[in-house]
Image (tube, helix red, strand yellow):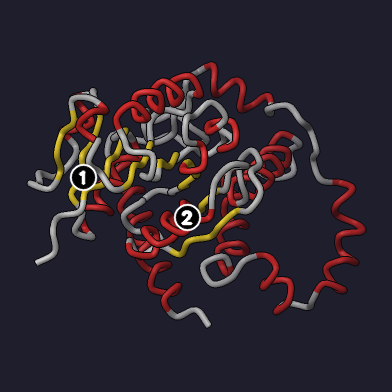
Amino acid sequence: MQPPRYIGLAGLGFLGRGIAACLLEHGFHVIALEPAAAAWQTLPASERLIRADSAKDLAHCEFIIESISESFPAKQALFDELERQVAAAIPITSNTSSIPITLLQSQRQHPRRFAGMHWTAPAEATRFMEIIRGDQTDEVTLNRVAALATELGKAPAIVQKDIAGFVANRIAYAMYREAIHLLEAGVADVETIDLLCRHSLGLWTPICGPFRWIDITGGPALYAKAMEQIVPTLNNESEVPAIMRRMQQNDDRGTQNGRGFYAYGPTDGAEWQRLLNKHALRTWALGEEEV
Protein backbone atom coordinates (compact mmCIF):
# COMPACT_ATOMS: atom_id res chain seq x y z
CA MET A 1 0.00 0.00 0.00
CA GLN A 2 1.31 3.43 -0.93
CA PRO A 3 1.79 5.92 1.92
CA PRO A 4 -0.80 8.71 2.10
CA ARG A 5 -0.09 11.80 0.03
CA TYR A 6 -0.87 15.21 1.49
CA ILE A 7 -1.85 18.37 -0.38
CA GLY A 8 -2.12 21.65 1.47
CA LEU A 9 -5.08 23.83 0.47
CA ALA A 10 -5.50 27.39 1.73
CA GLY A 11 -9.05 28.62 1.22
CA LEU A 12 -12.38 26.81 1.05
CA GLY A 13 -14.42 29.42 -0.75
CA PHE A 14 -16.50 28.89 -3.89
CA LEU A 15 -13.62 27.38 -5.86
CA GLY A 16 -11.65 26.04 -2.91
CA ARG A 17 -14.44 23.65 -1.94
CA GLY A 18 -14.44 22.18 -5.45
CA ILE A 19 -10.66 21.86 -5.40
CA ALA A 20 -10.87 19.99 -2.10
CA ALA A 21 -13.52 17.66 -3.55
CA CYS A 22 -11.36 16.99 -6.61
CA LEU A 23 -8.30 16.16 -4.51
CA LEU A 24 -10.30 13.88 -2.23
CA GLU A 25 -11.86 12.07 -5.20
CA HIS A 26 -8.37 11.22 -6.42
CA GLY A 27 -7.21 9.76 -3.15
CA PHE A 28 -5.23 12.63 -1.65
CA HIS A 29 -5.29 13.69 1.96
CA VAL A 30 -6.17 17.39 2.07
CA ILE A 31 -4.95 19.63 4.89
CA ALA A 32 -7.12 22.72 4.55
CA LEU A 33 -6.50 26.12 6.09
CA GLU A 34 -9.84 27.92 6.35
CA PRO A 35 -10.87 29.96 9.41
CA ALA A 36 -14.52 30.48 8.40
CA ALA A 37 -16.69 27.83 10.07
CA ALA A 38 -19.44 28.22 7.44
CA ALA A 39 -17.13 26.97 4.69
CA TRP A 40 -16.61 23.66 6.49
CA GLN A 41 -20.33 23.06 6.88
CA THR A 42 -20.82 22.68 3.13
CA LEU A 43 -18.15 19.98 2.72
CA PRO A 44 -18.86 16.25 3.00
CA ALA A 45 -17.23 14.56 5.96
CA SER A 46 -14.04 12.69 5.10
CA GLU A 47 -11.29 11.29 7.26
CA ARG A 48 -8.86 12.48 4.57
CA LEU A 49 -9.97 16.12 4.93
CA ILE A 50 -8.01 17.58 7.81
CA ARG A 51 -8.53 21.00 9.33
CA ALA A 52 -5.40 23.12 9.75
CA ASP A 53 -5.12 25.65 12.54
CA SER A 54 -2.20 27.51 10.95
CA ALA A 55 0.27 27.36 8.07
CA LYS A 56 2.48 25.21 10.31
CA ASP A 57 0.06 22.31 9.82
CA LEU A 58 0.85 22.33 6.09
CA ALA A 59 4.59 21.88 6.65
CA HIS A 60 4.74 18.20 5.60
CA CYS A 61 2.57 18.53 2.46
CA GLU A 62 4.08 17.65 -0.92
CA PHE A 63 2.24 20.47 -2.72
CA ILE A 64 0.44 23.69 -1.72
CA ILE A 65 -2.56 25.29 -3.46
CA GLU A 66 -3.67 28.80 -2.45
CA SER A 67 -7.29 29.70 -3.21
CA ILE A 68 -8.12 32.58 -0.88
CA SER A 69 -9.77 35.91 -1.77
CA GLU A 70 -8.47 37.85 -4.77
CA SER A 71 -6.44 40.26 -2.64
CA PHE A 72 -2.74 40.84 -3.21
CA PRO A 73 -2.01 41.83 0.42
CA ALA A 74 -3.91 38.79 1.75
CA LYS A 75 -2.06 36.42 -0.56
CA GLN A 76 1.31 37.97 0.33
CA ALA A 77 0.61 37.60 4.05
CA LEU A 78 -0.31 33.94 3.54
CA PHE A 79 2.80 33.27 1.45
CA ASP A 80 4.92 34.87 4.17
CA GLU A 81 3.52 32.33 6.62
CA LEU A 82 3.88 29.40 4.24
CA GLU A 83 7.50 30.19 3.44
CA ARG A 84 8.33 30.07 7.12
CA GLN A 85 6.89 26.57 7.36
CA VAL A 86 7.15 24.79 4.00
CA ALA A 87 10.43 23.43 2.64
CA ALA A 88 11.95 25.31 -0.31
CA ALA A 89 11.50 22.36 -2.69
CA ILE A 90 7.70 22.25 -2.27
CA PRO A 91 5.70 23.94 -5.08
CA ILE A 92 3.33 26.69 -3.99
CA THR A 93 0.62 27.57 -6.50
CA SER A 94 -1.97 30.33 -6.60
CA ASN A 95 -5.49 29.93 -7.93
CA THR A 96 -5.63 33.63 -8.77
CA SER A 97 -7.62 34.53 -11.86
CA SER A 98 -6.23 38.03 -12.37
CA ILE A 99 -3.13 38.85 -10.27
CA PRO A 100 0.11 38.32 -12.21
CA ILE A 101 2.16 35.41 -10.89
CA THR A 102 5.33 37.47 -11.41
CA LEU A 103 3.97 40.01 -8.93
CA LEU A 104 3.04 37.32 -6.40
CA GLN A 105 6.50 35.72 -6.53
CA SER A 106 8.45 38.99 -6.62
CA GLN A 107 8.93 39.26 -2.84
CA ARG A 108 9.34 35.56 -2.12
CA GLN A 109 12.36 33.79 -0.64
CA HIS A 110 12.18 31.00 -3.23
CA PRO A 111 10.33 32.52 -6.21
CA ARG A 112 11.20 29.65 -8.56
CA ARG A 113 8.75 27.31 -6.80
CA PHE A 114 5.76 29.64 -7.30
CA ALA A 115 3.35 29.19 -10.23
CA GLY A 116 -0.25 29.86 -11.17
CA MET A 117 -2.71 26.97 -11.01
CA HIS A 118 -5.94 28.41 -12.37
CA TRP A 119 -9.00 26.23 -11.78
CA THR A 120 -12.59 26.83 -12.86
CA ALA A 121 -15.91 25.80 -11.33
CA PRO A 122 -17.08 23.15 -10.82
CA ALA A 123 -13.46 22.23 -10.03
CA GLU A 124 -14.27 18.58 -9.37
CA ALA A 125 -15.97 18.09 -12.74
CA THR A 126 -13.99 20.10 -15.30
CA ARG A 127 -10.88 19.30 -17.34
CA PHE A 128 -9.77 22.94 -17.32
CA MET A 129 -6.35 23.68 -15.83
CA GLU A 130 -4.40 26.79 -16.77
CA ILE A 131 -0.82 26.73 -15.47
CA ILE A 132 0.98 30.06 -15.48
CA ARG A 133 4.72 30.58 -15.53
CA GLY A 134 5.90 33.65 -13.63
CA ASP A 135 9.10 35.34 -14.71
CA GLN A 136 11.05 33.35 -12.10
CA THR A 137 9.19 30.03 -12.18
CA ASP A 138 11.50 27.12 -13.02
CA GLU A 139 10.89 24.08 -15.19
CA VAL A 140 10.89 21.69 -12.24
CA THR A 141 7.94 23.52 -10.70
CA LEU A 142 6.01 23.69 -13.98
CA ASN A 143 6.51 19.98 -14.55
CA ARG A 144 5.32 19.12 -11.06
CA VAL A 145 2.22 21.30 -11.40
CA ALA A 146 1.41 19.75 -14.79
CA ALA A 147 1.95 16.25 -13.41
CA LEU A 148 -0.47 16.86 -10.54
CA ALA A 149 -3.05 18.34 -12.93
CA THR A 150 -2.82 15.26 -15.13
CA GLU A 151 -3.15 12.99 -12.11
CA LEU A 152 -6.34 14.85 -11.23
CA GLY A 153 -7.80 14.21 -14.69
CA LYS A 154 -7.21 17.74 -15.96
CA ALA A 155 -5.82 18.83 -19.32
CA PRO A 156 -2.89 21.04 -18.26
CA ALA A 157 -2.31 24.08 -20.49
CA ILE A 158 0.89 25.98 -19.73
CA VAL A 159 0.81 29.74 -20.29
CA GLN A 160 4.39 30.71 -21.07
CA LYS A 161 4.09 34.49 -20.60
CA ASP A 162 2.60 35.97 -17.46
CA ILE A 163 -0.11 38.51 -18.30
CA ALA A 164 -3.10 39.86 -16.36
CA GLY A 165 -6.04 37.47 -16.69
CA PHE A 166 -3.86 34.86 -18.46
CA VAL A 167 -5.43 33.31 -21.60
CA ALA A 168 -8.90 31.94 -20.87
CA ASN A 169 -10.08 34.95 -18.85
CA ARG A 170 -8.74 37.49 -21.33
CA ILE A 171 -10.71 35.89 -24.15
CA ALA A 172 -13.78 35.53 -21.94
CA TYR A 173 -13.70 39.13 -20.70
CA ALA A 174 -13.39 40.43 -24.25
CA MET A 175 -16.63 38.55 -24.93
CA TYR A 176 -18.30 39.86 -21.74
CA ARG A 177 -17.37 43.45 -22.66
CA GLU A 178 -18.82 43.12 -26.16
CA ALA A 179 -21.98 41.45 -24.84
CA ILE A 180 -22.55 44.29 -22.37
CA HIS A 181 -21.82 46.86 -25.09
CA LEU A 182 -24.50 45.28 -27.32
CA LEU A 183 -26.93 45.35 -24.39
CA GLU A 184 -26.24 49.00 -23.53
CA ALA A 185 -26.46 49.99 -27.21
CA GLY A 186 -29.92 48.42 -27.48
CA VAL A 187 -28.84 45.95 -30.15
CA ALA A 188 -30.45 43.05 -28.26
CA ASP A 189 -31.69 42.23 -24.77
CA VAL A 190 -30.07 39.93 -22.21
CA GLU A 191 -32.11 36.87 -23.16
CA THR A 192 -31.39 37.24 -26.88
CA ILE A 193 -27.64 37.72 -26.42
CA ASP A 194 -27.48 34.69 -24.13
CA LEU A 195 -29.53 32.60 -26.55
CA LEU A 196 -27.32 33.46 -29.51
CA CYS A 197 -24.12 32.70 -27.58
CA ARG A 198 -25.49 29.36 -26.42
CA HIS A 199 -26.38 28.30 -29.95
CA SER A 200 -23.21 29.64 -31.60
CA LEU A 201 -20.31 29.41 -29.13
CA GLY A 202 -22.04 26.56 -27.35
CA LEU A 203 -21.95 24.51 -30.53
CA TRP A 204 -18.17 24.37 -30.91
CA THR A 205 -16.37 25.35 -27.69
CA PRO A 206 -16.86 21.90 -26.07
CA ILE A 207 -14.86 20.28 -28.88
CA CYS A 208 -12.45 22.92 -30.20
CA GLY A 209 -10.96 26.36 -29.61
CA PRO A 210 -11.13 29.47 -31.82
CA PHE A 211 -8.20 28.56 -34.09
CA ARG A 212 -9.57 25.09 -34.84
CA TRP A 213 -13.03 26.56 -35.39
CA ILE A 214 -11.65 29.02 -37.94
CA ASP A 215 -9.84 26.19 -39.73
CA ILE A 216 -12.88 23.92 -40.01
CA THR A 217 -15.39 26.62 -41.00
CA GLY A 218 -13.76 28.36 -43.92
CA GLY A 219 -10.21 29.09 -42.86
CA PRO A 220 -8.21 32.22 -41.99
CA ALA A 221 -8.59 33.79 -45.44
CA LEU A 222 -12.38 33.82 -45.11
CA TYR A 223 -12.37 35.09 -41.53
CA ALA A 224 -9.91 37.87 -42.41
CA LYS A 225 -12.49 39.29 -44.84
CA ALA A 226 -15.12 39.36 -42.10
CA MET A 227 -12.65 40.93 -39.67
CA GLU A 228 -12.17 43.87 -42.02
CA GLN A 229 -15.82 44.80 -41.47
CA ILE A 230 -16.38 43.72 -37.85
CA VAL A 231 -13.19 44.44 -35.91
CA PRO A 232 -13.32 48.25 -36.34
CA THR A 233 -16.82 48.29 -34.82
CA LEU A 234 -16.04 46.21 -31.70
CA ASN A 235 -16.05 47.89 -28.31
CA ASN A 236 -12.58 48.81 -27.06
CA GLU A 237 -13.39 50.84 -23.95
CA SER A 238 -10.82 50.48 -21.17
CA GLU A 239 -13.26 51.33 -18.37
CA VAL A 240 -15.66 48.95 -16.64
CA PRO A 241 -19.09 49.34 -18.32
CA ALA A 242 -21.53 51.62 -16.50
CA ILE A 243 -24.11 48.88 -16.03
CA MET A 244 -21.52 46.69 -14.28
CA ARG A 245 -20.51 49.56 -12.00
CA ARG A 246 -24.14 50.07 -10.99
CA MET A 247 -24.56 46.35 -10.29
CA GLN A 248 -21.31 46.32 -8.33
CA GLN A 249 -22.55 49.20 -6.15
CA ASN A 250 -25.80 47.29 -5.61
CA ASP A 251 -23.79 44.17 -4.63
CA ASP A 252 -25.57 42.08 -7.26
CA ARG A 253 -24.13 38.57 -6.94
CA GLY A 254 -26.30 36.64 -9.35
CA THR A 255 -27.51 33.29 -8.03
CA GLN A 256 -25.77 33.90 -4.69
CA ASN A 257 -28.21 36.62 -3.60
CA GLY A 258 -30.85 36.49 -6.34
CA ARG A 259 -29.78 39.68 -8.11
CA GLY A 260 -27.97 39.70 -11.44
CA PHE A 261 -28.89 40.11 -15.09
CA TYR A 262 -31.75 37.75 -14.20
CA ALA A 263 -33.79 37.45 -11.00
CA TYR A 264 -33.40 34.20 -9.03
CA GLY A 265 -35.55 32.49 -6.43
CA PRO A 266 -34.25 30.68 -3.35
CA THR A 267 -33.81 27.32 -5.12
CA ASP A 268 -32.62 28.60 -8.51
CA GLY A 269 -28.95 28.75 -7.55
CA ALA A 270 -28.85 25.06 -6.67
CA GLU A 271 -30.64 24.14 -9.90
CA TRP A 272 -28.20 26.11 -12.05
CA GLN A 273 -25.30 24.50 -10.19
CA ARG A 274 -26.79 21.07 -10.92
CA LEU A 275 -27.08 21.92 -14.62
CA LEU A 276 -23.53 23.27 -14.68
CA ASN A 277 -22.16 20.11 -13.07
CA LYS A 278 -24.11 17.91 -15.48
CA HIS A 279 -22.84 19.84 -18.49
CA ALA A 280 -19.26 19.85 -17.16
CA LEU A 281 -19.31 16.06 -16.97
CA ARG A 282 -20.65 15.81 -20.53
CA THR A 283 -17.89 18.15 -21.70
CA TRP A 284 -15.34 16.05 -19.81
CA ALA A 285 -16.56 12.98 -21.72
CA LEU A 286 -16.24 14.86 -25.03
CA GLY A 287 -12.71 15.81 -24.09
CA GLU A 288 -11.81 12.16 -23.67
CA GLU A 289 -12.74 11.66 -27.34
CA GLU A 290 -10.47 14.43 -28.65
CA VAL A 291 -8.55 13.60 -31.83
Q: Residue furthest bottom?
A: 291
Question: Element under label 1?
Answer: strand
Across and down, in percent, residue 36 comes to 23, 23
The residue carrying pointer 1 sits among few (fewer than 14), some (14 to 19) or many (20 or more) residues within 10 Å by Cα, namely many
Across and down, in percent, residue 228 comes to 92, 59
Q: Please identify the quadrant where the N terminus is shown.
A: bottom left
Task: Say the numbered circle drawn on residue 270.
Answer: none
Residue 258 shown left or right of residue 85 in the figure: right
Q: Nearer the viewer, residue 267 or 15?
A: 15
Q: Amino acid at mark 2?
A: Val
The residue carrying pointer 2 sits among few (fewer than 14), some (14 to 19) or many (20 or more) residues within 10 Å by Cα, namely few
Could you tell me if the residues under marks 1 and 2 are in contact, i.e. CB atoms within 8 Å? no
Q: Residue furthest top?
A: 249
Residue under label 2: 140
Residue 280 quadrant: bottom left
Q: CA distance from mark 1 to mark 2?
A: 23 Å
Residue under label 1: 30
Q: Nearer the viewer, residue 52 or 186?
A: 52
Please tell me which residue is depicted at 59% across the width and 36% down the height of the picture: 102
Please tell me which residue is depicted at 46% across the width and 59% down the height of the picture: 143
Across and down, in percent, residue 186 comes to 73, 38
Across and down, in percent, residue 34 comes to 25, 28
